[in-house]
Image (cartoon, rainbow, N blue to C red):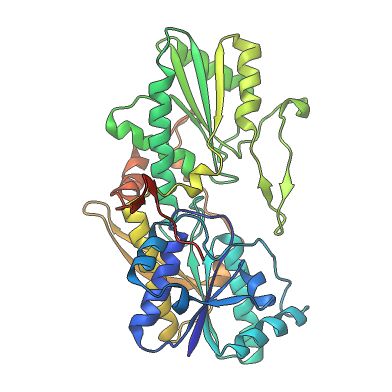
Amino acid sequence: MNIAVAQSGGPTAAINASLLGVYREAKRSGKVDKVYGALNGIEGVIDDRLVILNEKLDTPEKEELLRQTPSTVLGSCRRKLPAPEIATDVYERIFGVFAKYEIGAFFYIGGNDSMDTIDKLSQYGEMTGSMIRFVGVPKTIDNDLLFTDHTPGFGSAAKYVAATVQEIIRDSSVYALDSVTIVEVMGRNAGWLTASLCVLKAIGEEAPHLIYLPERPFKVSDFISDINEVRQTRRAVVVAVSEGIRLDFEDHADDGRHQVLDGFGHVGQMAGAGKALERVVRRELGIKVRAIELNVMQRCSSHIASLTDITEAEEIGAAAVNAALSGETGVMMTIERLSDEPYRVRYSQTKLHGVAGLEKKFPTEWINDEGNGVKDEAIKYFFPLIQGEVPIRYENGLPRHFKL
């Protein structure tokens, strides 16, 4: 049979490794003829824009370049499918394309919203008696998917954020001046990525001195008090905030943030918390203050990717193929942690019905009582996920990337 694979949602440094895992395992199995890639997620299936990956990845060198290339090489989308029982026309189109290319299994690499999409495809397939198998392959730097210990893409983002903030810490201490540096980290509703900065304590860093997550209420007055308390012993204060913290300004114009909704009704852009807090610190404390928004670099930086993350991303893509070939459908692949030391995991699957559209929040028991820091117990969870460095192929001093 032939299979098809697509990528969706926000890019990561590891999503192409999962694509490679699907492709390599399909070839190795001897049970798959052609591997099709749909351009721009489910939209590529709807519009019949498929490419034959066997022709694009025709050398081992190209496969290795794909593995080290960040973002979604097939392109992405944020299109929400209607319920299959009330709008069959789009599903008839999708399944018509699957029939045209003799697709026996479809793999969707993505996060919460992508799992919603493939869940609906699986439901329609069940309604119509289709034999096509549907498997979700998780990825998100937000690390907020249920029933999996962590998600591919998160470890590399955490490694990048920690390394970057470590460099910011060095820069912030250059001058003999009182200062506040506010680093805004991605995390719409779940603070996993911001919280992962606690790993810096494991290498002797005292900063970030304050960490704020969306899982706890945020009060601007407490924020200023927290900074003043740190200033009693530290000249340069470094603060990390999740982009999704809810600021309690009475005048919402002070917030300075505007909401842009994506196709799933979620806030697609939520940047601005750091800048809003910068204005508050400047007004209330009158000292040097700078807000740094790490922005898309958190999800597209592969030059400092975690080897653990990239390896697991490829392995879970391969596990998805094996699951489909063994008859599994309507499932999302998961990572189960077996131990921290030594770090060991295994791959399994869970039904999509319990995953799609839901979020896993950062555990509140790992947040300190003051709501401005992360307890040391969280370090053993994060630390294995950022280990190892990916060997990168360079050309003229710069990393090489695979392009379709």
Residue 166, compared with residue 361, is above or below; it is above
Q: Position of residue 25 (x, y in %)?
A: 37, 77
Residue at 28 percent across and 49 percent down: it is: 388
Residue at 29 percent across and 53 percent down: it is: 391
Residue 103, compared with residue 349, is above or below; it is below
Residue at 51 percent across and 50 percent down: it is: 142
Q: Quadrant of residue 255?
A: top right
Question: In terms of depth relative to the viewer, which is nearer, 337 or 294?
Answer: 294
Q: Position of residue 363 (x, y in %)?
A: 47, 45
Question: In terms of depth relative to the viewer, which is nearer, 54 or 395?
Answer: 395
Residue at 68 percent across and 52 percent down: it is: 266
Question: In terms of depth relative to the viewer, which is nearer, 73 or 287?
Answer: 73
Residue 219 in view = no
Q: Position of residue 114 (x, y in %)?
A: 59, 65
Q: Is residue 270 left or right of residue 351?
A: right
Q: Total of numbered circles in the picture? A: 0
Q: Is residue 13 left or right of residue 61?
A: right
Residue 326, compared with residue 301, is above or below; it is below
Q: Is residue 224 left or right of residue 372?
A: right
Question: In terms of depth relative to the viewer, which is nearer, 211 or 89?
Answer: 89
Residue 240, compared with residue 144, is above or below; it is above
Residue 214 in view = yes
Q: Quadrant of residue 91?
A: bottom right
Q: Position of residue 202 (x, y in %)?
A: 29, 34
Name the residue at the front extreme: 396
